[in-house]
Amino acid sequence: MLHEPAESLASDPLRREIVACAREYRPEDSVAYDAARECLVDALAGALEALRDPACTKLIGPVVPGATMIGGARVPGTSYELDPVKAAFDLGTLIDWHAPAVPDVAAENDRPADCLGGLLATVDWWSRTRLATGDESPTVHDLLATLLTAQELQRMLGQESVPQGFRPCRASRARVATAAAVAAALGGTHAQVLAAVSHAVLDGGAPRLNVAASGGHPRARWTIGDADSRGVRLALIALAEEPPGPATHPPACAPAAHGSPMPSARRADDSSRPGAEAVRTRFAAAVRAHYPARQAALLAAIFADAAALDAKPVHELVSALVRN
């Protein structure tokens, strides 16, 4: 396979900004973290609700029936222990399964949790790996910081202006943002994060698919799961020192203009977000419906204290969400 020199990739303005954001962006606004935590809780509620739908659950679990990965990523609400790539697909699909379809161009708008499936699967696996080697494990606060970074990356990609009003589809933005955020979160060097971004930009991924206009096409239900999964896979390839591809953007990612990162606190003012009380109510109902009473009470206590939740290692949180 032919590859362009690293210098040509490094000179690509959009990729340079994406890599800088992924590796250097450190949100500090407490309001932004409150919004990210709310996003996490709402996404978990949606995932638990999706597990009631047989059409969804038949897509969840190991690709080969009975296969497992000891020490891998868990899928909340289930007993599955998978490699992080398949777990990212499962989580992304569960989270997005009941997302409302909007019958216009808004169906292509990003949702705050679009990258969360890939991030949570990866950070759970990474947290367990570090625990096994005696290293400090990432906390929920670290996960929220990575989520805020991914949201900022989605915003940057969504700002692009191209001929005839075309812009990267929602799945493409989720794939690129996930790849960049995962590669950076796992300690990727500048060159490795750049490689992850390059692969994700070049990857064809799922076709541009407007959920509302798709006439109920089944692929619409797992397009975001597929994007999250591809993002994680491409990040892991880059971390294994796979060289990046050519610097030329495909049409879906050709930028005309893009700016510096916007404070992620804007998420807290997004009128599309459900209210905090509504999120808590939804989560409590989903937990009561899905878990035995004792486990449901434990989860209620864990999520009742935001400071304690943020300090909890990610593997401990996901362990509490496993259902055997």
Image (spheres, helix red, strand yellow):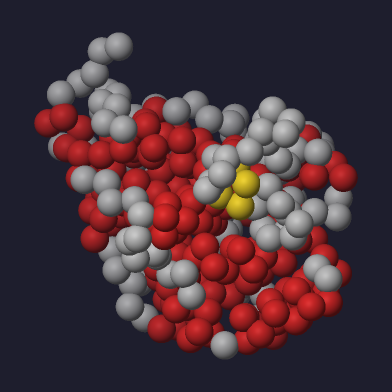
**Where 240 sits versus 171, above or below?**
above
Front residue of this view, candidates 229 and 162: 229
**Where 251 sits versus 45, above or below?**
above
**Where 218 sits versus 25, above or below?**
above
- Give x and y (percent) for residue 27: 33, 72
Location of the C terminus by quadrant is bottom right
Can residue 20 be seen from the camera position used here?
yes
- Point 40% across, 49% down: residue: 182
Front residue of this view, candidates 309 and 252: 309
Location of the N terminus by quadrant is top left
- Point 27% across, 46% down: residue: 188
- Give x and y (percent) for residue 168: 48, 40
Q: Quadrant of residue 4?
A: top left
Furthest residue toward left? 7
- Give x and y (percent) for residue 54: 87, 45
Say whether residue 259 is left or right of residue 44: left
- Point 59% across, 30% down: residue: 207
Total count of labels:
0
Say whether residue 240 is left or right of residue 289: left
